[in-house]
């Protein structure tokens, strides 16, 4: 994660996930330079995400399971971090926003994934999908289940959820995170902060509206 977006520990000065005396995450390459680690992480995670995205999305039953989300994290970051695929085990915050305490992550995440599965059935329009994506991106962000890579995993997870929505309603939407411009980046970053602070989803909705591509001519929902 870039330095200007660095996570901070709430209860201790030294993260159990970092090398002693540093804020550099312990990694499989034993890289001790933050910029170098970020470069390697970015390249490898992008490659792994590309591999995942050319595969079929699993079934409803499999996707809405905490084990699947952990497996997805493991697939993307397993070559980089020894803690990949594991639920976070320390308190962290970003700025003035504390994330979910580790002892409550699993239970909150299980309930949230079940709620996502049920709320999909309530979708009736494209606007509903936009709200759905913004709301659940914010909710997963506040839980922040992993020590690193939460944003990338959440975006990929929601991309797969859109595929499942397509299957349910026989649509052709694509949640596309390529070619993100500076405005989109600003909406995503600031939207994550604002939604965590006061629940305002305006910026996140703008972000997902720009990323949800209509791939078919007839946009009406088929029942």
Image (tube, grey):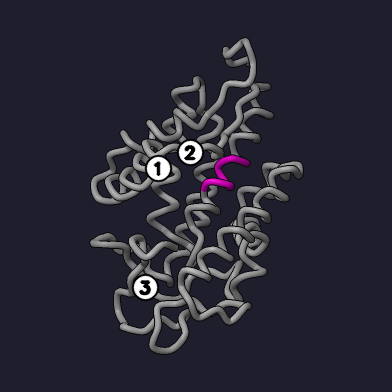
| Location of the N terminus (image quadrant) | bottom left
Q: Nearer the viewer, residue 188 or 138?
A: 188
Q: Pointer 2 and pointer 1: residues touching (CB < 8 Å)?
A: yes
Q: Most prominent secondary structure in the magenta stretch? A: helix
Judging by the rendered image, the residue that carries numbered circle 3 is 91
Q: Nearer the viewer, mark 3 or mark 2?
A: 2
Q: Secondary structure at mark 1?
A: helix
Residue 106 can be seen in this image: no
Judging by the rendered image, the residue that carries numbered circle 1 is 185
Query: Where 21 sits versus 75, above or below?
Result: below
**Tag on residue 12?**
none
Residue 195, how many percent across, how many down? 30, 45
- Label 3 crowding class (10 Å Cα cut-off): few <14, some 14-19, many 20+? some
Q: Pointer 3 and pointer 2: residues touching (CB < 8 Å)?
A: no
Magenta part of the chain: 155-160
The answer to which quarter of the image holds residue 83 is bottom right
Nearer the N terminus, badge 2 or badge 1?
2
Left or right relative to 6: residue 215 = right
Q: Secondary structure at mark 2?
A: loop
Residue 36, how many percent across, how many down? 52, 70
Marks 2 and 1 sit apart, C-alpha to C-alpha, by: 7 Å
- Label 1 crowding class (10 Å Cα cut-off): few <14, some 14-19, many 20+? few
Query: Where 56 sits versus 71, above or below?
Result: above
Q: Residue at x 44, y 45 (%)?
A: 137
Task: Assess whether residue 200 is covered by the magenta stretch.
Answer: no
Q: Residue furthest bottom?
A: 20
Judging by the rendered image, the residue that carries numbered circle 2 is 180
């Amino acid at each position: 994660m870039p330095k200007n977006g660095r996570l901070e520990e709430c209860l201790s000065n030294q993260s159990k996930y970092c090398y002693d005396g540093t804020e550099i995450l312990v990694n499989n390459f034993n890289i001790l330079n933050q910029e170098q680690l970020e470069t390697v992480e970015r390249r490898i995670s992008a490659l792994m995400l590309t591999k995942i995205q050319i595969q079929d999305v699993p079934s409803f039953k499999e996707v809405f399971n905490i084990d699947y989300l952990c497996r997805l994290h493991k697939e993307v970051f397993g070559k980089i971090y020894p803690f990949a695929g594991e639920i976070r085990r320390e308190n962290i915050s970003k700025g003035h926003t504390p994330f979910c305490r580790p002892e409550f992550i699993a239970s909150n995440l299980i309930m949230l994934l079940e709620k996502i599965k049920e709320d999909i059935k309530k979708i009736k329009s494209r606007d509903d999908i936009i709200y759905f994506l913004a709301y659940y991106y914010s909710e997963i962000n506040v839980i922040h289940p992993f020590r690193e890579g939460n944003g990338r995993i959440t975006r990929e997870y929601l991309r797969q959820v859109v595929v499942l929505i397509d299957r349910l309603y026989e649509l052709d939407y694509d949640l596309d995170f390529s070619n993100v411009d500076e405005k989109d980046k600003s909406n995503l970053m600031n939207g994550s902060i604002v939604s965590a602070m006061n629940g305002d989803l305006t910026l996140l909705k703008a972000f997902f509206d720009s990323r949800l591509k209509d791939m078919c001519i007839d946009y009406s929902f088929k029942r």
